[in-house]
Image (tube, rainbow, N blue to C red):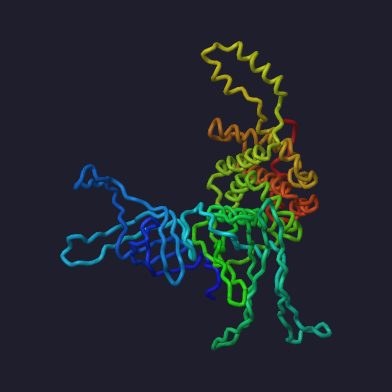
């Protein structure tokens, strides 16, 4: 359907005319091509001037090393306006002086394409709504327009049944001056007639619409898409790829003679998100999902996620990296897991200084008085009133539901001590002679799980659901077993 969004995993091609934003009268024919692997490439029959030139004096042109780039290229193809951003010439072939006259050729790579609008740059407030769909969004929403019924009179299936559709009302919440809506869009039924049979089809698509009070830019839209993508990644504990991103163009409303207003013009965004969605990939196993809108309603989790996103993003990215792109060596994974814990502790701003500020200042000044003046700056930079890694681990373990933590880490003190020693040995000596590979692996898994529980706690997941996750989620249940085997003190440290 021509009204469908452009999927980021599907290839596309647009033949048309192209021009530089500051020179709209000089158009060049060419073809824009997009595919998920190769990105965006514009092949021109002709060329934009990409040489860097200067005129030191009248009648003299100097050519300099390097090539020009263009922030914005506009185009018109398939009856749609197109904007290309972040453009770099990849190759240029000029035929001046050739034996047979033929046009120049030039290939340009672009970072982003907006199919359906001309904008002046990624900060141009040209849009009024962004709509994004990511993998597993329908599973997370925990709603569907479909209902199925199998006929079974007297308890025996008789071959009858039906699939019915009941529209789902959009869920909405306002955060600051921005409205977020969880929306279902379904197609009308149709029959796909094949030589070997017929298939009846309908499709339910789930998306999140983001509508700020004032027009916003492409950069803001990409930020909102990332915010949604990160939320679903946390909820499903897997990299949730972006399927498509569509924008509504400000000021594009039109009116019919009878006074009815037609919808705004829509523009599709082609770019390379952190993870690319696959439409036909299997849905994640429900047992591996941390929460859905059933356990944490949409109108509650969105405001919390918007508030906590910046503080949680670095830690969650590191944890997802461990989950889906782990390093080959356990030592590297150890540094990542412990780093995620430290980053999360700092960003949550729960630091408790070891000493009162006045007391610490007095102690530090007394120590510095004993240091030769030429070395004081060096020592002053070393003496800090910051919590240790062990302090941070204790603090993180104290935040989620304590029964969930007790299931996951039966000996918090031993875990904190062994994790601290492993990280310090690796950081200072480059090796961990006091830990077995099995213990190091367990430390990585347990520390990762503690960070996850803290993120879920910060989002407001109930104590009961935290306990269920530790008990039932395959990964955390396995981690709890490792902790009982490898991270319980057999004798006092």
In percent of the image, x 64 and y 81: which residue is there? 189
Number of numbered discs:
0
Seen from the viewer's position, the closer of residues 209 and 398 is: 209
Relative image position of residue 186 (x, y in whole percent): 64, 74
> In the rendered image, which quarter is residue 377 located in?
top right
Return the x and y of residue 141 as percentages of the image width and height: 70, 63
Residue 277 visible, this orientation: no
Q: Quadrant of residue 490?
A: top right
Q: Quadrant of residue 241?
A: bottom right
- In the image, residue 485 sits, relative to residue 116, either above or below, namely above
Between 114 and 458, the residue placed more toward the observer is: 114
**In the rendered image, the vertical position of residue 104 relative to residue 342, given as above or below:** below
Q: Does the rendering let one see residue 217?
A: yes
Assign the C terminus to one quadrant of the image. top right
Name, please, the residue furthest toward the right: 154
Residue at 56%, 70% (x, y): give it: 254
């Amino acid at each position: 359907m021509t009204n469908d969004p452009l999927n980021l995993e599907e290839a596309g091609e647009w033949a048309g005319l192209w021009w530089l934003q500051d020179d709209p009268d000089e158009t060049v024919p060419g073809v824009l091509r997009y595919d998920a692997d190769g990105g965006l490439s514009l092949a021109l029959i002709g060329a934009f001037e990409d040489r860097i030139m200067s005129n030191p004096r009248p009648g003299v042109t100097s050519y300099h090393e390097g090539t020009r780039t263009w922030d914005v290229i506009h185009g018109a193809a398939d009856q749609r306006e197109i904007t290309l951003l972040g453009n770099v010439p990849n190759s240029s072939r000029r035929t001046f002086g050739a034996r047979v006259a033929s046009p120049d050729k030039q290939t340009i790579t672009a970072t982003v394409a907006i199919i359906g609008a001309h904008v002046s740059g990624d900060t141009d407030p040209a849009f009024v709504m962004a709509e994004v769909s990511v993998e597993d969004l329908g599973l997370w929403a925990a709603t569907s327009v479909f209902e199925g019924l199998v006929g079974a009179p007297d308890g025996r299936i008789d071959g009858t049944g039906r699939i019915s559709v009941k529209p789902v009302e959009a869920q909405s919440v306002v955060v600051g001056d921005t409205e977020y809506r969880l929306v279902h869009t379904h197609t009308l039924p149709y029959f796909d007639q094949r030589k070997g049979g017929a298939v009846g089809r309908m499709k339910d698509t789930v998306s999140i619409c983001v509508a700020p009070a004032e027009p916003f830019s492409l950069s803001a839209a990409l930020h909102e898409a990332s915010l949604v993508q990160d939320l679903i990644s946390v909820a499903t504990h897997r990299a949730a790829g972006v399927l498509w991103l569509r924008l509504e163009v400000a000021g594009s409303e039109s009116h019919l003679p009878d006074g009815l207003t037609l919808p705004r013009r829509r523009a599709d965004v082609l770019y390379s998100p952190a993870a690319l969605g696959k439409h036909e990939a299997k849905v994640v196993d429900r047992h591996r999902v941390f929460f859905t809108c059933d356990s944490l309603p949409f109108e509650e989790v969105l405001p919390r996620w918007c508030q906590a996103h910046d503080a949680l993003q670095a830690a969650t990215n590191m944890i997802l990296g461990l989950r889906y792109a782990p390093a080959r060596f356990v030592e590297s994974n150890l540094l990542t897991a412990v780093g995620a814990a430290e980053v999360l502790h700092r960003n949550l701003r729960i630091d408790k200084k070891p000493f009162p500020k006045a007391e610490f200042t007095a102690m530090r000044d007394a120590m510095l008085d004993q240091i030769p003046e030429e070395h004081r700056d060096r020592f002053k930079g070393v003496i800090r009133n910051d919590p240790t890694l062990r302090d941070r681990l204790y603090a993180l373990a104290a935040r989620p539901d304590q029964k969930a933590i007790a299931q996951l880490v039966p000996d918090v003190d031993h875990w904190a001590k062994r994790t601290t020693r492993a990280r310090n040995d690796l950081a200072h000596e480059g090796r961990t002679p006091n830990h077995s590979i099995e213990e190091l692996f367990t430390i990585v898994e347990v520390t990762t799980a503690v960070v996850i529980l803290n993120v879920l706690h910060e989002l407001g997941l109930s104590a009961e659901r935290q306990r269920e996750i530790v008990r039932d989620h395959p990964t955390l249940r396995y981690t709890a077993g490792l902790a009982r085997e490898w991270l319980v003190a057999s004798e006092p440290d």
